Image: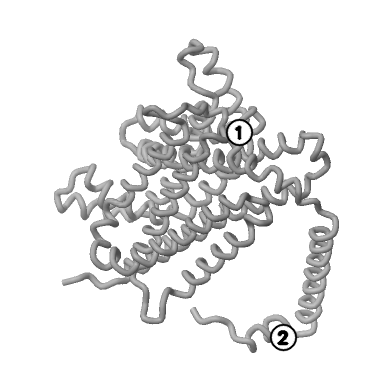
Amino acid sequence: MSRPSLQSWRRQLFGSVPDTLLSLGLGALLVWAAWGFLHWAFGQAQWLVLRANAATLTIGRYPEAQEWRLWLLLGLLVSLTGLSWGLLRGRATAAGWPLNDRIAAGLLSLLTLVVPPLLAFGGLNQLRLLFLLGLLLLLRGLAGRWLAHRWGQRLAQSWPLVWAGAYLLGLWLIGGGLGLTPVRPSDWGGLMFTLLITSLTLLLALPLGVLLALGRRSELPLLRWVSVAYIEVIRGAPLITLLFLGQNLVGFLLPGGLAPDRVWRAAAVLTGFAAAYVAEAVRGGLNAVPRGQLEASRSLGLSTAHTLGLVVLPQALKVALPALVGQCIALLQDTTLLSIIGLFDLLGIARSVLANPDWLGRYAEVYLLLAVLYWCSCSALSLGSRALEQRLSSSNLRPAHR
C-alpha cells in the first residue's frame, strides 16, 4: 500500500470550501486542546504524587527485601522478548533493521532515558533499566542474525513451550517456593498484578473457550446443551455479580482451610467469564470454515481429532483472531473491577494512594497515568495481533517448496 503524497493530503483536507472550513476548525480545536493540556501539565499539575508512589503503583505492597525476584523475572522476560523479536522478524537486511524495528528501538530507548528521571527512580534502578534495554536490543540482533537463519524453524515449534516454562517460573519467583520466602498473593498489586492476572486468565480461557465452542457444535445432545447453557448464563450475568459470588460463595461452600486465596478466586471467575466470550468468537471462526474441508479430511482417512487439530481449528482461529484480540483487550480493562472486591490491582492501588491525606485532590495526575498505562497495554495487544495477522496472511501467499 503506497503512502499518501502531499498533493493527496491537500486534496483530501482542502479539496472544497466545506472541507477547508472543517479542517481549519478541527485543527484550531486540536491546537486549543493541546495548549490547554500543556498549560496544565507544566503549570498546574503536581507530578510529585507519581514520583513518590512510582514503586507502589508498579508492584503494590510487594516486600522491598524481595524485589530482586521481580528484577530477575523482568530480565528473563526481556531476554525472551528480544529472542522472540529476532526470530519473528528474521535476519537484518543489508541496510540494517527494518524501519518499524528501528522506530520501536528508538521509542524504547527514549522511554528508558526519559521516564525513570521523571518518576525519580533511584540511580541503581536506572542502570538496571538501561542494562535491560541493551540486553533486549543485543539479543534481538543476535537472534535475527544467527538463530533465525540456522534454527528458526526448529525453535518456532518449541518456542511456545519456552514461554510457558518462563511463565511458570515467574509465578514461582513471585509467590515463593523451594526455599524462597513466601509472598502472599494479597500482597501483589499494581501494574504487576494487573498484567499477571490478565495473562493468567487469557492462558486458561483460550483452551476452555475452544472446548466450549466445540461442545456447542457437538452432535452429542447432553454435551451441546451443557455448553449452550454455560455460555448463555455467563454471558447474561454482569461480571461484577460473578466476582462477588466467587468471593463469597466459595467461602461458604468450602471450609476455611480449603478455600483458595481471594486472588485465585477472582482469577477463576475471570477465566470462566472470558471463556464464554472466547467460545462465541471461536464458534464464529468454526462457522466460517467450509464444510468441504471436513469432507476432504475424512476422505483422506483423518480421524476426528486430527481433523480438528490440523484442518479445522487452524483456519477457525485465524478467522476469529480479531475477535479474540478484542476479548483480550476487554478482559484487560475488566480487571479494574477487581478493586471493587478489595484486590489491589492498578486501579485499586491508585485509589489507596489517593486516599492518603498528602495526595488528596490529585486525581487528574494519577488517573492520567493509569489511562496511559492501559492505553499502552491495549495498543501493544492490538499491534501484536495486527502483526500476527499480516504474518499469517503472508505465509499463505508463499509458494510451497518442492
Residue 89 lies left or right of residue 196; in this view the side is left
Could one spot residue 302 in this view of the protein?
A: yes
Q: Residue at x 44, y 74 (%)?
A: 98
Q: Residue furthest top?
A: 255
Label 1 Cα crowd, 10 Å radius (few <14 / some 14-19 / many 20+): some
Q: Residue at x 67, y 52 (%)?
A: 119
Across and down, in percent, residue 339 comes to: 65, 33
Could one spot residue 331 in this view of the protein?
A: no
Q: Secondary structure at mark 2?
A: loop
Q: Residue furthest bottom?
A: 7
Across and down, in percent, residue 30 comes to: 78, 69
Q: Residue at x 41, y 81 (%)?
A: 95
Across and down, in percent, residue 364 comes to: 78, 49
Residue 121 lies left or right of residue 147; in this view the side is right
Amino acid type of disc 2? Gly
Q: Nearer the viewer, residue 217 or 260?
A: 260
Classify residue 54 by image quadrant: top right
Residue 200 lies left or right of residue 58; in this view the side is left
Determine whether 110 is above or below 306 in the image.
below
Residue 74 lies left or right of residue 191; in this view the side is left
Circle 1 residue = 61
Circle 2 residue = 15
